[in-house]
Amino acid sequence: MAGSSYLGYRGDDANTDFAEFFDPKMAALPGHIVDALHHGPQADQVLLDFDSAAHLLDDGYHQTENGYGHLRNGGFQVSVRTDMPGVTPQMWDWWFGWHGSDTRRYKLWHPRAHASARWADGNNDGNEDGHYVGRTSLIEEYLGSAYAKAAIRFLPPEQMGLPADRLGDSVAICARLGSSEVPVDIGWFVHQIRPTPDGAEMRSRFWMGGPYVRVRHGNLLANTVVRPVAARQLPDPRDLMVHCAQEMNHLAVFLPALYAKFG
Amino acid sequence: MAGSSYLGYRGDDANTDFAEFFDPKMAALPGHIVDALHHGPQADQVLLDFDSAAHLLDDGYHQTENGYGHLRNGGFQVSVRTDMPGVTPQMWDWWFGWHGSDTRRYKLWHPRAHASARWADGNNDGNEDGHYVGRTSLIEEYLGSAYAKAAIRFLPPEQMGLPADRLGDSVAICARLGSSEVPVDIGWFVHQIRPTPDGAEMRSRFWMGGPYVRVRHGNLLANTVVRPVAARQLPDPRDLMVHCAQEMNHLAVFLPALYAKFG
């Protein structure tokens, strides 16, 4: 299933100057994510609408900062907040431009689930590090027990309705998420990172399935045919919520030190 | 799906003398409900039998005060205990007669899931407030992510096997639960509230699906045809348990103050 990819470091994988940051032990889930798991699926009306993604740029918090729910349109939505003392939004901007050219870097992020990463444009020698918007990251990872071969196409925030002139001190990492094996997209996500008094907080929003499934360069008929098939390939919203909370909390702990060394 | 109904207060919804009690922030689930979620479905033999509802009037506690399980008859059962310091059983008796004539009152109870409430008899001007037994409350609410349009027909406790002369200081709110769109009932519930040294405790019991599904004024054939269809419309027992625990704990916090003002 995972082909030549594998979890963890093997052989001389650790022969890098960043390997000291590879820590297979992950922190406990934050209490607010545990609460969200207990609460189960939420009413669609308390979840952020895809067309209202710009509300992430408002002050304050949404009614659901952590949780998931099934939408009337057949899709689902997942939200996760990650508190990150000592982190700045710019560190995440750097991370997204840095990690994608090297599987060993990608594995730092979620040592229990990340198997492989490379850029679709073939620039994996590090020369194009520092750019991610407009590029497609080809990754292999587990979501729960399901193995996904995904293509993450990073977009300018404007393309998801977040105007650049409203970002202020925050960073918004936006992407179209799809398969790397078939020309089908299955969802969208935003990770908005904004400063807090003691660092930063990330507010992640995913919209998956239903109308968010689309055949790349396809037509309406193709979408209609593909959606029911794609629906069976979607991650469980709970697994996606846990995975996101784990990787973001894990990286946030050593991101300041990693950035100090390589940023 | 939600039609003209919506969650939360909008426009001049807050122009009432009870709006101060509308609090969109809900308390954490009690630990004993979290435990019950972790425990998952229970053996039917440790769940209260529908025909033994009168055991709620015995002293002490049942083997399962919090939990849920699937029954051999095809239905499921859900139990929830809510500890309510400072509350009296009579306050709940008052609440059930007071909230049903006004959506804005109903929304106080579960601000993340309650969308609409009115009495089927059309007496929604407040003149019939104070009565609920024998009346049918038409509500719209989310259970998890599922939107339900329900008809709750409140019954004299005798009709569920709880003799009036054994209630003592306790109150038992009993109801047949069904659809407001089709003439189908899908379950029964009791909320028994009894005094404790520091207030009161509510013991909720739901019996849903299986033989508890019945076509109103229908016959055996109708029931046989409808049951498999109705089974697909039933809430997830976990979502029902969480919803009940949330709304009862939420209201219990301000019920004494609400009752002092309007009771």
Image (tube, coloured by chain):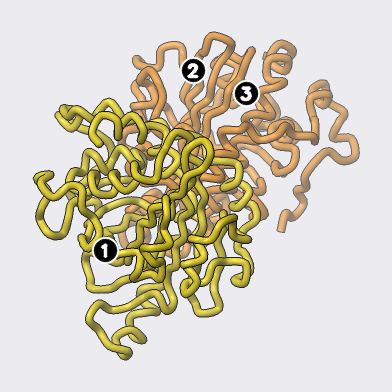
Chain colours: A orange, B yellow
Mark 2 crowdedness (10 Å alpha carbons): few <14, some 14-19, many ≥20 = many
Left or right: B224 as drawn, with respect to A245: left
Q: Disc 3 to disc 2, how far (Cα)?
A: 15 Å
Q: Nearer the viewer, mark 3 or mark 1?
A: 1
Task: Name the image quarter holding the N terminus of chain A.
Answer: bottom right
Residue occupying image coordinates x 23% and y 55%? B132
Q: Nearer the viewer, residue A213 or A26?
A: A26
**Mark 1 belongs to chain:** B
Q: Is residue A120 left or right of residue B213?
A: right
Characterize the local packing of mark 3: few (<14), some (14-19) or many (20 or more) Cα atoms within 10 angstroms: many
Q: Closer to the observer: label 2 or label 1? A: 1
What's the distance in space between the residues labelled 2 and 1, CA to CA? 49 Å
Q: Which residue is mark 1?
A: B153
Left or right relative to A17: residue A223: left
| In contact (CB < 8 Å): disc 2 and disc 1 | no
Q: Secondary structure at mark 3?
A: helix
In this figure, which residue is indicated by the disc labeled 3? A95
- The residue drawn where x is 58% and y is 13% is A199
- Image coords of residue A66 (percent x, y): 49, 35
What chain letter is assigned to the residue under label 3? A
Distance (Cα) linking label 3 and label 1: 58 Å
Q: Given the image, on which type of amino acid does mark 1 rest?
A: Arg
Tell me what residue is drawn at x 68 percent, y 20 percent: A255
Looking at this view, is A13 or A250 the one in front?
A: A250
| Disc 3 with disc 2 on a shared chain | yes
Q: Are marks 2 and 1 on the same chain?
A: no
Image mark for residue A194: 2
Q: Amino acid at mark 3?
A: Trp
